[in-house]
Amino acid sequence: SIKKNTKVLFMLYENVITRCKKTCSFHNELYSKMSDMILNKVIELNTRIELLTKRTTRDKLLSYFDILSSNRLSKTITIPLSYTDLADYLSVDRSAMTRELGHLIEDGFIIKEGNKIKLLY
């Protein structure tokens, strides 16, 4: 799993859903940032669900590469995770994933240099 330092903020639900009567800038920014955070989390979870519904390791890898490529608007991408973390994220065996990366190179789908991948399709 991906390990990150985490801070937890506890807030009263009533304080979050009701706007401040003074309409102060702090609360306006809080509402804006919180809605952005929730939306980003929904997108992240939907993306993960989409990847996990793929049947094969190849399909999961190619879909993951497509997502990174479209987010960066480039056919050259950098994998932001270690192989172990990527395998965990895709719910595949690490050695099978590494073997499939080799097959993708052999089949002419990608060129790989370290954690940089160039998509050839």
Image: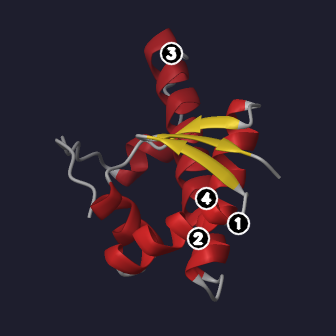
Residue type of the residue flagged with mark 4: Ile
Residue type of the residue flagged with mark 3: Lys
Q: CA distance from mark 4 to mark 3?
A: 60 Å
Residue located at (67% from left, 75% from top):
59
Q: Which residue is mark 1?
A: 107
Residue 16 appears left or right of 49: left
Residue 49, disc: none
Residue located at (19% from left, 44% from top):
6
Location of residue 118 (image quadrant): top right
Q: Are marks 2 and 1 in contact (CB under 8 Å)?
A: yes
Q: Which residue is mark 2?
A: 103
> Regarding mark 4 in the picture, which secondary structure is present there?
helix
Q: Which quadrant is the N terminus positioned in?
A: bottom left
Between discs 3 and 1, the one toward the N terminus: 3
Between discs 2 and 3, the one toward the N terminus: 3
Q: Which residue is mark 3?
A: 22
Q: CA distance from mark 2 to mark 3?
A: 61 Å
